[in-house]
Image: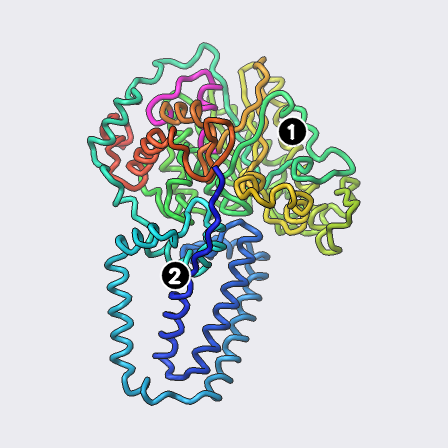
Amino acid sequence: TQYTMTYNYAFEIISWLFLWLLVYVLSGRFLFSTSVVFLLFFFFFFSNGQKMRLLLAPLMVSDVFAVSELARQKNMFYRYLVYVVGAGVFLAAVSAVAWKKSRQRRIITENRVALLLGLVLMSLLVVANRAPIARFLMERDWFFNKVNPVMSVYQYGGLATLLQAAVFAPDYKDMVDYNRSAVQNVIKKYGLDAQMPAALPEEPVNLIIILTEAFTDPDEVGWKTTQDALPTFHEVRAKHGGRVLSPVLGGRSANAEFELLTGFSMRFTPANSIPYTDLIHRNIPSLARFLNKAGYLTMAIHVASLDFFNYKKVYDYQGFGMFTTLWDKAPKADPMGMHASREELAKLIIKASTFHAPFFIFTFPNYTHGDWRYDSFADSELDVIDPDHLLSADERPRVKTYINALHYSDALFADLIAHFSTRKEKTLIVMLGDHQPFLEGYRQKAWQRMVEKYRDNEVTKVLANYWVPVALWSNYERPEEKFEYSMNFLPSYLIEQLGLIPSGFYKLNRILRDKIGVLSWVVKDPDGGYSFPIPFKYRPLARDYELIQYDILNGEDYFGQLMNDERIKE
């Protein structure tokens, strides 16, 4: 299905005019109001463009709540803070000059209170009638598209997209026919109340997941290197692995982890949300909880601080038995000088694997996350080959550092394989990326080589930016397999790889995986292509999936009650 291109800026124009009118009423100065709103428009347009270029996502009101996460990345935070402060100083200076050069309009000052009350009343009426207004906008194709908000900016405008997402997007509580009976019908329809097997397989399989920050395959992105940057990963992936469609690009790693560990889809969460901080406030189904009930030790290990993304509470809500970090604990740092070394991380994973069998260990190494010290690998022979000279003098050391950081992460994979290949108990190690990097020069410059190919196909553009590689290694024989799934379908897949039968929510997850395979911002259609809208054939199934997800995360958790889940007793 091709995405229909429309350009309807009526709401955008009305929104900026309303902002101008508000400033005009408050100030009473025409030149001042016009100057300020024009500069705000310019800064907003520029900032929106920068975020879309780097992260394929427009500015949203909820970005304000992500500032605290950005602040922990000090180098990146201070770099952007300089831009914000500079823009603020420039705006203040221009505003001061415009204020002095403009005169107050007497008609405005004399009627300011009445005009302000009128604007406030108008705003309240709009908010009070947001549902019918949203329907009106949708009927005229003026309403933002949550599935592809970047296209919404092009089609409807940046401020229109921001305001519509913040004010007019329908609340999940407005879902039609959401009630206890609807949830019960889904459970019965798919037999989700079937019990899990009473016992583990005769030879249970241990599981290690390495979700690697900003992990890509340079060969697939379009770069050649002086030597193989991912020798271990390539060797394993050639037999077992494929591609996974991440829900994010360049940042918000917690959203990729959310899909990977829960099986829920970001497609069905509020626009621009971070479920770890916005939605998860009680015990929920997760891969950790499922395996914990099956008798597994479950543990999460980070190298960065657990103060990010509400990790400490969320891991508890997901049922992890233990979680820890090497942040400020390990004596040896990685070559970039940012985190505990791969040797320290491998040592802790191996130690944790001796606590109990079987075990599930989830780890999230950040070695491929900028900003780094860009002289970290200055003497390395591993470098990117750039015959077209796409990289600038500033970009080249950044890309070289990233390529070497990939190689360093690959060595962690090799370390774990070397150890567990000598162990008798069955072990499966999964390595994948959380998203592609926003690193300027690496992804954006390589993209130039593919512009012509993707110029008229927005779906393909999105796909090219969201695929990440995955490889599965085991110390026992498994049939060769290549697959392509969206991140949210990996939980049921991995449960089956461990010799267990997905049940409860993960039975529904498996059904969708078998029938659809990719259900993210893009959806795999019955003919094997991809589209933004959910194909008609899959809409009832996707609706049932969305209903259960909403019930568990936002609703009354009828699912847990009806399944007599142990979460109710905890």
Please give left or right for residue 140 compared with residue 420 in the image: left
Residue 501 screen position, x and y as percent = 40, 17
Instruction: Give how far apart the Cα atoms at labels 1 and 2 are.
Output: 49 Å
Q: Which mark is residue 295?
A: none
Does residue 68 show up? no
The answer to if 500 sits in the magenta stretch is: yes
Q: Residue at x 67, y 32 (%)?
A: 411
Can you say whether 93 is above or below 377 in the image? below
Total labels drawn: 2
Q: Quadrant of residue 563?
A: top left
Most common secondary structure along the magenta stretch: helix
Q: Quadrant of residue 534?
A: top left
Question: Could you say whether the residue bearing mark 1 is in a helix, strand or loop?
Answer: helix
Residue on which disc 2 sits: 11
Does residue 143 show up? yes
Dot 2 crowding, Cα within 10 Å, few <14, some 14–19, many 20+: some
Dot 1 crowding, Cα within 10 Å, few <14, some 14–19, many 20+: many
Residue on which disc 1 sits: 233
Can you say whether 174 is above or below 162 in the image? above
Amino acid tagged 1: Phe
Q: Residue at x 50, y 77 (%)?
A: 92
Residue most extreme to the top:
202
Q: Using the image as rendered, state which of residue 332 and residue 399 is in the foreground.
A: 399
Question: Could you say whether the residue bearing mark 2 is in a helix, strand or loop?
Answer: helix
The answer to if 502 sits in the magenta stretch is: yes
Q: Quadrant of the C terminus?
A: top left
Q: Residue at x 74, y 45 (%)?
A: 377
Q: Are marks 1 and 2 in contact (CB under 8 Å)?
A: no
Range shown magenta:
487-506
Q: Using the image as rendered, state which of residue 302 and residue 235 is in the foreground.
A: 235
